[in-house]
Image: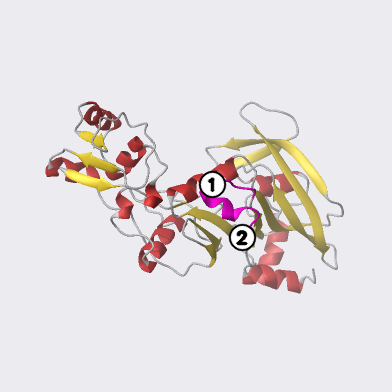
């Protein structure tokens, strides 16, 4: 028999989700069968898996050691690097992600911000290898590999659920800085529909509804122009968070982001590559504003955070006298 005590950071999740992390190689049917036969109990009583766990709850596994070892599998992968942490407390963490880093794995061999986050928390003692058996810290929003800026992460289940909920219901405000081709003179609110080609991982924006296309909304305002009028520094508020939304939406109105190989101008991109060595889109998740929260994370209500621009982005702004 093995006895597990639910920790504060693991509370709030369903029992079946908790068990699926601890016995990650076990089929769901096996877990539910063990619950029905009382080979897995919660606080000494029969459970069906839908129960919401609280700190100090006791989960008992009346299973052979061989069975436990078989279904526990390998431990969560962790890597270390120097993370630019903007804000951190017991529940949440906000990181300024650099260009070139994945937010989450796209392939099993990838190393993403999630693995670096796990390594960071292990290294500072905020997490133990034992904790990883039943809880995985993770990011709550994703940026394209070559988009820099703020990524929110949960260190506890309460942190993950609260932030993920705010991103999902759009009560959290997200602002980006983008260097767009051409002169954008007036603020605008643009709507459209985004259709993704899964084969090419490229999206298309249309003004009219299309089958399998999702509605998108973007608000933007110009902050400054280059002296020649070749580019505009924009503040972009992302009202819906779709794949490549800002990049494709700006391209669809004739102002693609400089450095964007997928949606931008080849001629413009080549000019900036030669002049500044720009090799990816100049798009940065710049600012985030929290909504009002209730409960355990109410202290985050109204919090505003900004992420410093990458050195190359600042160099282009300075060089273009923006």
Image quadrant containing the C terminus? bottom right
Is 4 on the left-hand or right-hand side of 113? left
- In the rendered image, residue 298 lying in the magenta stretch gets the answer yes
Image quadrant containing the N terminus? top left
Q: Give the residues in magenta.
A: 291-304
Query: Of helix, strand and loop, which one carries label 1?
Result: helix
Relative image position of residue 279 (x, y in whole percent): 61, 63
Q: For the point 64% across and 26% down, which residue is it?
A: 211
Disc number for residue 85 = none
Q: For the point 64% across and 48% down, which residue is it?
A: 292
Relative image position of residue 100 (x, y in whole percent): 52, 61
On screen, residue 146 above or below 82: above
Is 41 on the left-hand or right-hand side of 240? left
On screen, residue 39 above or below 6: above
| 2 vs 1, front mark | 1
Question: In terms of image quadrants, where is residue 167?
Answer: top right
| Residue under label 1 | 295
Q: CA distance from mark 2 to mark 1?
A: 41 Å
| Residue under label 2 | 280
Relative image position of residue 301 (x, y in whole percent): 62, 52
Query: Of helix, strand and loop, which one carries label 2?
Result: loop
On screen, residue 310 above or below 13: below
- Count every numbered label the image shows and give the total: 2
Q: Is residue 146 shown to the viewer in this render?
A: no
**Crowding near pointer 1: few (<14 within 10 Å), some, many (20+)?**
few
Q: For the point 24% across and 35% down, which residue is it?
A: 41
- In the rendered image, residue 197 lying in the magenta stretch gets the answer no
Is 120 on the left-hand or right-hand side of 67? right
């Amino acid at each position: 028999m093995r006895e597990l005590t639910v920790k504060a950071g693991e509370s709030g999740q369903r029992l079946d989700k908790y068990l699926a992390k601890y016995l990650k190689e076990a089929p769901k049917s096996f877990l539910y069968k063990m619950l029905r036969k009382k080979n897995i109990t919660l606080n000494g009583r029969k459970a069906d898996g839908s129960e919401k766990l609280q700190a100090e709850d006791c989960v008992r596994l009346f299973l052979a050691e061989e069975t436990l070892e078989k279904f526990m599998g390998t431990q969560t992968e962790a890597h270390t690097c120097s993370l630019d942490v903007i804000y951190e407390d017991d529940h949440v963490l906000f990181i300024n992600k650099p260009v070139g880093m994945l937010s989450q794995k796209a392939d099993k061999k990838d190393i993403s911000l999630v693995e670096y986050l796990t390594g960071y928390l292990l290294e500072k003692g905020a997490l133990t290898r034992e904790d990883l058996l039943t809880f995985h810290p993770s990011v709550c929003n994703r940026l394209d590999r070559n988009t820099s800026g703020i990524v929110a992460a949960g260190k506890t289940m309460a942190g993950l659920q609260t932030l993920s909920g705010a991103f999902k219901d759009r009560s959290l405000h997200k602002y980006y800085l983008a260097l767009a081709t051409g002169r954008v003179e007036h603020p605008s609110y643009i709507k459209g529909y985004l259709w993704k080609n899964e084969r090419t991982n490229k999206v298309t924006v249309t003004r009219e509804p299309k089958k399998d296309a999702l509605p998108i909304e973007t608000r933007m305002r110009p902050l400054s122009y280059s002296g020649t009028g070749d580019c505009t520094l924009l503040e972009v508020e992302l009202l819906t968070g779709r794949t490549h939304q800002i990049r494709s939406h700006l391209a669809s109105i004739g102002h693609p982001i400089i450095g964007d190989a997928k949606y931008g101008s080849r001629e413009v991109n080549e000019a900036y590559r030669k002049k500044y060595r720009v090799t990816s889109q100049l798009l940065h998740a710049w600012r985030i504003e929290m909504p009002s929260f209730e409960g355990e994370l109410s202290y985050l209500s109204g919090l505003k955070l900004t992420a410093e621009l990458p050195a190359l982005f600042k160099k282009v702004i300075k060089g273009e006298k923006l």
